[in-house]
Image: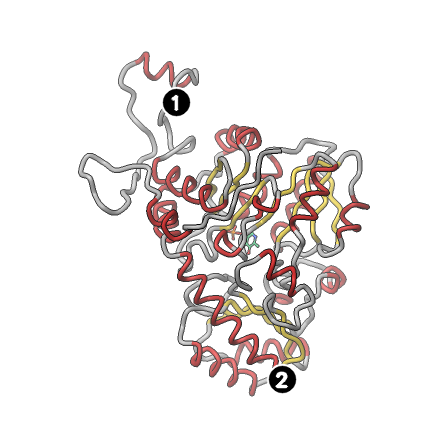
Amino acid sequence: MAARPAPVPNFETVSIRTQTERSQHREHSVPMFLTSSFVFDSAEHARALFAEEQTGLVYSRYGNPSVDEFIEKLCALEGCEDGIATASGMAAMFGSMAALLSSGDHIVASRAVFGSTHSVLTRILPRWGIGHTFVDPADIEGWRRAITPATRMLFVETPSNPGLALVDLESLAQLADQHGLILNVDNCFATPYLQTPARWGAHMVTHSATKFIDGQGRVLGGAILGPRHLIDDVRSFARATGPALSPFNAWLLSKSLETLAVRMERHCQNALTLARHLEQHRGVSEVRYPFLESHPQRELAARQMRHGGGVVTFEVVGGLEAGKRFLDGLQMITRSSNLGDARSIATHPTTTTHCKLTEQERQAVGITPGLVRLSVGLETITDIIADVESALQNT
Ligand SMILES: *Cc1c(COP(=O)(O)O)cnc(C)c1O
């Protein structure tokens, strides 16, 4: 196995100063290349490019300088060798599985995965003969027991959405190596600023860039990162099937990475302050946040993550109706299903993002009827707390 990358010590500099292209105008900021195709110097040049004897730009489904710049920056920040940018996070999740697995293969996945990832595993991949087993993410022995001779991949989100359960990435990577499996980690909630899965031995890192990486709720995007031998297979799959990220979105996301560190610092500071406040509130029966003393995996969180992240999940006393009344009582915080925005967003998972799960499946991952997921934004923390307080009066 390749040596593990160290965390990027100068994260801010790398995120700001990685620049692959300047045009002949020598612009200071990053240029945007909105073009679907590129020009060949000669018929022979075109032939050599298509024959893959020469590398170069051909068509934006294959590669584009704005997209390449975004992915190069993200690879540097995650400590990954190579990567592919995709049009959405789900194109990344699906692509990372579909490109590397075949009929008869099997995935062991955390029970606590994003709703659409759950659908890919349960409704789409089985139609092509790719099976799965869900396990309790925190139970390493459970992961081990679920591995069969057909297993090729372990898939996990940490922290999970919306329950904020953590997985010990180092132990899971060791397990994957023992069995020759690919450990694929959805690092959307943490971002490379808080956690770099490759450092703990994960083989692939997948992202929804729509969330904290964009950070302002403007565009969809995603990425699949990993060692070159795996990404080569993902690249040929992506070139043929076309999940390409738009150059415009890539340009925005590349600019967004420049401010990721400072934004995450404030998201996390606001989230921890709110989580501590909610723990004292009579209208709230449980608060989940990785850096709270009460989080059952607090020690692991401190080892694996820089801070606790920008999402706080809590249980409103009074169940389903109280959860809905809480959302309706908010004045400033937006009712929406997105997260990772500068604007604070409240979501009621039972009736929205996780409504496709059965009651039993929701119970198994701790999505109770009164659960609220709050993506804590960058507004003044006293205003965030005041809005949450007044909505809780409404429950
Ligand atoms: C949002 C999200 C996704 C899907 O990303 P899209 O960009 O919406 O397709 C995948 N995983 C996690 C953890 C997410 O929060």
236 left or right, relative to 293: left
How far from the left and from the top, in percent, is residue 59? 37, 29
The N terminus: image quadrant: top right
For marks 1 and 2, the one nearer the N-term is: 1
Label 1 Cα neighbours within 10 Å, binned few <14 / some 14-19 / many ≥20 = few
Q: Residue furthest right?
A: 145
Residue at (44%, 42%) from the top-left corner? 76
Q: Quadrant of residue 261?
A: bottom left
Q: Residue furthest left?
A: 25
How far from the left and from the top, in percent, is residue 336? 50, 66
- Asked if disc 2 is less than 8 Å from ligand 1, the answer is no
Q: Quadrant of residue 377?
A: bottom left
Numbered disc 1: secondary structure: loop
Numbered disc 2: secondary structure: loop
How far from the left and from the top, in percent, is residue 165? 66, 61
In this rendered view, identify the residue nearer to me: 205 or 103: 205
Q: Amino acid at mark 2?
A: Gly
Instruction: Say if 326 sits above or below 127 in the image.
Output: below
Instruction: Say if 241 sits above or below 289 in the image.
Output: above
Q: Quadrant of residue 287?
A: bottom right
The C terminus: image quadrant: bottom right
In this rendered view, identify the residue nearer to me: 111 or 227: 227
Instruction: Say if 293 sits above or below 53 in the image.
Output: below
Q: Which residue is mark 1?
A: 55
**Distance from label 1 to label 2 (Cα)?**
61 Å
Residue at (75%, 61%) from the top-left corner? 364
How far from the left and from the top, in percent, is residue 283? 62, 84
Q: Which residue is mark 2?
A: 283
Q: Amino acid at mark 1?
A: Thr
- Asked if disc 1 is less than 8 Å from ligand 1, the answer is no
